[in-house]
Amino acid sequence: MIKRVVIVGGGLSGLVAGIHLVLRGCRVTVLEKKAYPFHRVCGEYVSNEVLPYLGSLGVDPFAWGAQRISDFELTSVNGKSAHMPLDLGGFGISRYTFDHALAHYAATLGVEIRENSEVERLAFRSGRFEIRTDRHELEAQVVVVAHGKRSKLDYQLTRAFVTRRSPYVGVKYHVRYPQPLERISLHNFRDGYCGISAVEGGIQNLCYLVHRDALRKQGDIPRLEQHVLARNPFLSDIFQNAEFVFSRPEVINEITFERKEPVLNHLLMIGDAAGMITPLCGNGMAMGIHAAKLACESILQWNGEEATRVAMEAHYRHQWNRAFALRLWSGRQIQRLFGAETPSNLAVALARNVSPVARFLMSKTHGQPFV
Ligand SMILES: Cc1cc2nc3c(=O)[nH]c(=O)nc-3n(C[C@H](O)[C@H](O)[C@H](O)COP(=O)(O)OP(=O)(O)OC[C@H]3O[C@@H](n4cnc5c(N)ncnc54)[C@H](O)[C@@H]3O)c2cc1C
């Protein structure tokens, strides 16, 4: 039975879900509030675990210029460093290129992509969803919500996490800097950490997460970088010698790693809308892509009869928890080792001297390849 599916949000997870469903015969519309291409705050390092599944959808990030990444460097607030190979590895590609190319590919397969369409209201009545954007009204049998970490819709859905302020701010640049292209570095500073790794075209992504109190105390981003980040000598060198491609950084706030629900009011949530992992684990994108796969499989297995909708939702909730609940918990624990002087020194000492422990921690930050 052909299902009419509307996907709210055309980021990585929404677009991948659209591609999966259209390839299996569904009628799919993706509603995206912005217009491609555009930059997002993201470290732009994707774990290799997604490659077999992306391949099964006909997606090859290397054809779009992705850079292979195989080597990891960790530095502490006081400037000590450790190197190790990445156990699974990954690739770097800017979201500007990746999301745009995915949207174009989805459209060629028959996904209807409506840009500049922000969903304002979702209602479920008599087995149908009514979807209202700032420009259209639509109906669908299934709605997949892929609107990212926080959206106006979360307020309409009265989700608990929106009532609490989130303590983190994310900042991103693209720079030219002579770091080996196959390396991802994670540099700690007081109250945060900063990653640098290559994307397409030999450009490096420089992206950090910082506690908002640290930013407030310094007053603005240049002072924060000068007085806090640059205390780590590796970051001091980057900020002094890199050539900055953007005239100003991309900045987001209200980043939360709180628990959320994968299913709410009959909506299937994927990606950051279902739960966000700490960027330290470098894996939000891989999780979003994996969640898209799980949601699509639950939708496709469903016979479309209203009486069995709840069983379909329970199936997705179960699959989501099995795949991610422990991983999100591990991410929150590992996050505690970073962004503070003593724990980050300890993490670097562990990586230098007790490599089995370091390898174990690393293995907890990503999933296994899936197809
Ligand atoms: C500082 C930082 C660094 C990170 N680094 C990495 C990294 O290196 N590797 C990694 O794997 N992950 C990283 N992440 C996490 C990663 O960016 C996210 O997990 C990923 O982008 C989630 O994808 P998504 O599709 O769920 O949401 P998004 O990519 O955020 O897409 C959501 C889309 O929905 C649209 N939208 C929102 N509301 C509406 C609406 N009402 N109607 C229509 N459209 C709407 C938005 O415009 C957006 O295009 C990082 C995150 C942060 C904050």
Image: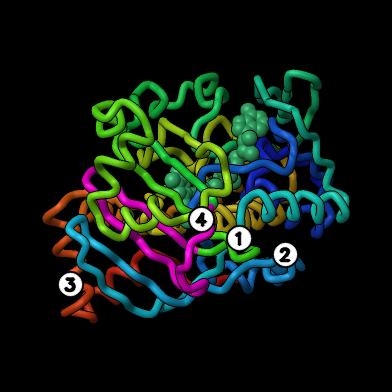
Residue at the left extreme? 342
Residue of label 4: 205
On screen, residue 22 versus residue 299, left or right, reads right
Mark sitting earlier along the chain (3/2): 2
Are the two marked residues, 3 and 1, in contact with CB atoms closer than 8 angstroms? no
Residue at 58 percent of width and 60 percent of height: 203
Q: Looking at numbered disc 3 in the image, what kind of residue is underneath it?
A: Leu
Packing grade of label 3 (10 A; few <14, some 14-19, many >=20) is: some
For marks 1 and 4, the one nearer the N-term is 1
Q: x, y percentage for residue 118?
A: 69, 26
Q: What amino acid does circle 2 point to?
A: Trp
Q: CA distance from mark 3 to mark 1?
A: 30 Å
Nearer-N-terminus badge (1/2): 2
Magenta-colored span: 175-197
> Which residue is denoted by mark 3 in the rendering?
350
Residue drawn where x is 43% and y is 53% of the image: 321
- Magenta stretch: dominant SS? strand
Element at label 3: helix
Give the camera-side residue of 270 and 321.
Answer: 270
The amino acid at mark 4 is Asn
Q: Position of residue 263 (x, y in %)?
A: 52, 39
State which tag comes first along the sequence, 3 or 1: 1
Type of amino acid under label 1? Ile
* Cβ of mark 4 under 8 A from ligand 1: yes
Question: Which residue is rendered at x = 28% and y = 49% of the image?
Answer: 230
Rendered view: 123 above or below 190: above
Q: CA distance from mark 2 to mark 4?
A: 16 Å
Mark pair 3, 2: CA separation:
37 Å
Is residue 61 depicted above or below 231 in this figure? below
> Which is more toward the observer, 16 or 73?
73
